[in-house]
Image (cartoon, coloured by chain):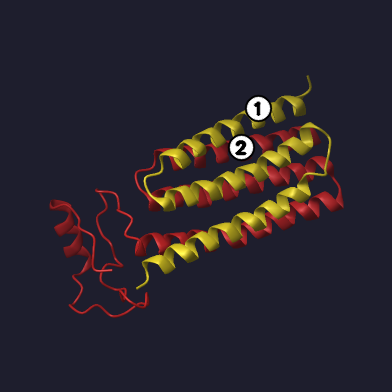
Chain colours: A yellow, B red
Amino acid sequence: MNFIAWTTSLSVAIIGLSILFIFMRLVKGPTIEDRIVALDLLAANAIAFIAVYSIQNDTTTFLDVGVILALLAFLGTVAFAFYLERRTKK
Amino acid sequence: MKDVVTGIFLLAGSLFILLSAIGVLRMPDLFTRMSATTKASTLGIGLVLIGTAIHWMDLGIASRAIAIILFLFLTAPVAAHIIGRAAYFDRVPLWEKTHIDELKGRYDEKSHTLTAPKSPVPSRKKAFKKSATEAPERGGI
């Protein structure tokens, strides 16, 4: 097992652990804003996961998915926040 | 040599991502949680993508990685600001040890625009002293 395989395996483990932590916050999150923040962070972690996966499995196809995911995460966050703020506006 | 640099970037990036995840799980209220997630996770993903770009040594991959990094660096503060604003109007409770809420009384309730406070705002020092002794209260949005 060479160095790069070892580091990618470790990175996948660490990113998986952080996805678990964020998911705990997503389930627990007392307010809806906590859940939105957790969802945003989950999408960001998915991008990092895709980048590590592309090195590990020697495919570059999924990096395009990362670009789209970054766009969609931002749009989703802005849409959630927009409607949330409109709800509080009288 | 290239592999070592890639590995260091990947490990550093994933450690920063883990740091942001621990922050989002352990921080006491929404605003501190957001401060953990926005900065640490952006840096972590940036490092991981730089590692990917170094590993492939290819113009197409590098440009995709740079596009993602630029987009994240542009959108993360905007998204955090928008959620923070919505959360403040939604009266998400602050941490009970928060000393001062500088926006208190400065927002117009109806139009959500900044206005001058009706009563003179107490100076920073006074507000700090006051709220250090008694529990801070929210309201006046």
Label 2 resides on the chain identified as: B
Q: Position of residue B2 (x, y in %)?
A: 80, 36
Mark 1–mark 2 contact, CB under 8 Å? Answer: yes
- The residue closer to the viewer here, B33 or A3, is B33
The residue depicted at 44 percent of the width and 62 percent of the height is A84
Which of the pair A68/B9 is nearer the observer?
A68
Q: Residue at x 68, y 42 (%)?
A: B48
Q: Nearer the viewer, residue B87 or A7?
A: B87
Relative side of A87 to B49, left or right: left
C-alpha gap between disc 1 and disc 2: 9 Å
Residue A19 in view, yes or no: yes
Q: Residue furthest top?
A: A1
Q: Is residue A10 left or right of residue A81?
A: right
Type of amino acid at the residue the image marks with label 1 = Leu
Q: Position of residue B24 (x, y in %)?
A: 45, 42
Question: Where residue B91 is drawn, which disc sits there?
Answer: none
Q: Nearer the viewer, residue A66 or B58?
A: A66
Query: Residue at the spot x=34%, y=44% of the render?
Result: B28
Q: Position of residue B43 (x, y in %)?
A: 59, 48
Residue at x 52% of width, y 51% of height: B39
Q: Is residue B63 above or below residue B110?
A: above
Q: Secondary structure at mark 1?
A: helix
Q: Chain of mark 1?
A: A
Q: Please count the marks in the image.
A: 2
- Dot 1: within a 10 Å radius of its alpha carbon, few (fewer than 14), some, or many (20 or more) residues? some
* Residue at mark 2: B14
Residue A10 tag number: 1
